[in-house]
Image (cartoon, rainbow, N blue to C red):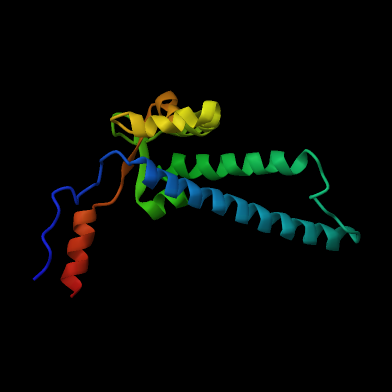
Amino acid sequence: MSPPLLPDAGLEGHYAGIVTRLGGFIIDVVVILVLFALAGQALEYVLTVMLRHQVEFSGATILPPVALGVWAFVYFAHPLAVSGRTLGMAVVGVRVVRADGSELSTRRAVVRVLALPLSFLLLCFGILLIALRGDRRALHDLIAGSAVVYAWDARAARLRFLARR
């Protein structure tokens, strides 16, 4: 006998909560940092071989933080503009849409990414809005006119799993 389905098991289209969003964001930050470090090491190696002297970016003062900022912007903005989700968002099953539920435009994706740092100012008040607002929108969501929703149907996934037994 299988356990009864919960009435709220189908979450697709519902606003994503702070824990789910934080999980996706942490995954994204780890991916950004790991890929940036690996690419930096590979570039140092290639330049060292080509120029025949040791090249180290770690000694530079302005280049690494600027390059990391550009990489983080591209990492967030491009997938949001193309599919409405980053790798971390895909892993936790959420996606970004316009506040009215339609597809996110490239312009809104860029505005959302540019406004993201504002949510961390003033003791993360912009992030705290996720827990305080009924529509779970952070400050950067309000600025960009976007919302984060669950993008998978938990009930359908559970039924597919039960059907395999």
In this image, 94 relative to 165: left or right?
right
Residue drawn at (29%, 38%) of the image: 15
* Quarter of the image with the N terminus in it: bottom left
Between 127 and 63, the residue placed more toward the observer is 127
* Quarter of the image with the C terminus in it: bottom left
Estimate the x, y position of residue 28 in percent, counting from the top left.
51, 49
Judged from this view, the residue extending furthest toward the bottom is 165
Between 49 and 130, the residue placed more toward the observer is 130
Count of numbered circles in the view: 0
Work out whether 9 lies above or below 120: below
Residue drawn at (25%, 41%) of the image: 13
Estimate the x, y position of residue 64 in percent, counting from the top left.
73, 44
Residue drawn at (30%, 34%) of the image: 102
Residue 47 visible: yes
Estimate the x, y position of residue 137 in percent, counting from the top left.
36, 31
Q: Quadrant of residue 42?
A: bottom right
In this image, 154 relative to 94: left or right?
left
Work out whether 88 lies above or below 63: below
Residue drawn at (42%, 32%) of the image: 128
Judged from this view, the residue extending furthest toward the right is 53
Residue 114 visible: no
Q: Quadrant of residue 47?
A: bottom right
Judged from this view, the residue extending furthest toward the front is 123
Estimate the x, y position of residue 138 in percent, counting from the top left.
41, 31
